[in-house]
């Protein structure tokens, strides 16, 4: 799909990411109504000394 918008919000322990994408007609046919897709992404960075 094509990215429409990307928003991030840093919180104390986690970062929230809102990503909107334009789905192709093939992928769109796999969703029903207001399906929500979520996933966890590890964004922890190693500290360098």
Image: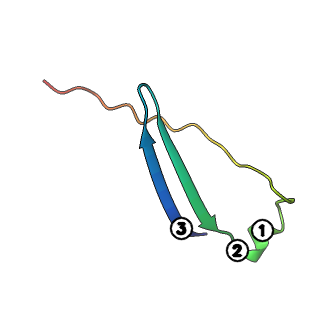
User: Mark 2 or 3 closer to N-term?
Assistant: 3
Q: Quadrant of the N terminus?
A: bottom right
The colour mode here is rainbow
User: Which residue lies under the disc numbered 2?
Assistant: 24
Q: Position of residue 3 (x, y in %)?
A: 53, 67
Q: Are the residues tagged 1 and 2 within 8 Å (C-beta)?
A: yes
Residue 16 or residue 32, whichever sits in front: 16
Q: Residues within 10 Å of mark 3 (few under 14, many from 20)?
A: few
Q: Horizontal placement of 40 versus 25: left or right? A: left
User: Which residue lies under the disc numbered 3?
Assistant: 3
For numbered disc 1, what is the local secondary structure?
A: helix
Q: Are the residues tagged 3 and 1 within 8 Å (C-beta)?
A: no
For numbered disc 2, what is the local secondary structure?
A: loop
Q: Residue at x 12, y 23 (%)?
A: 49
Residue 26 or residue 9, whichever sits in front: 9
Mark number, residue 19: none
User: Which residue lies under the disc numbered 1?
Assistant: 28
Residue 42 or residue 7, whichever sits in front: 7
């Amino acid at each position: 799909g094509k990215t429409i918008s990307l928003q991030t919000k840093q919180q104390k322990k986690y970062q929230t990411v809102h990503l909107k994408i334009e789905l192709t007609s093939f992928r769109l046919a796999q969703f029903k109504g207001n399906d929500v897709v979520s996933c966890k992404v590890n964004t922890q960075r190693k500290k360098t000394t």
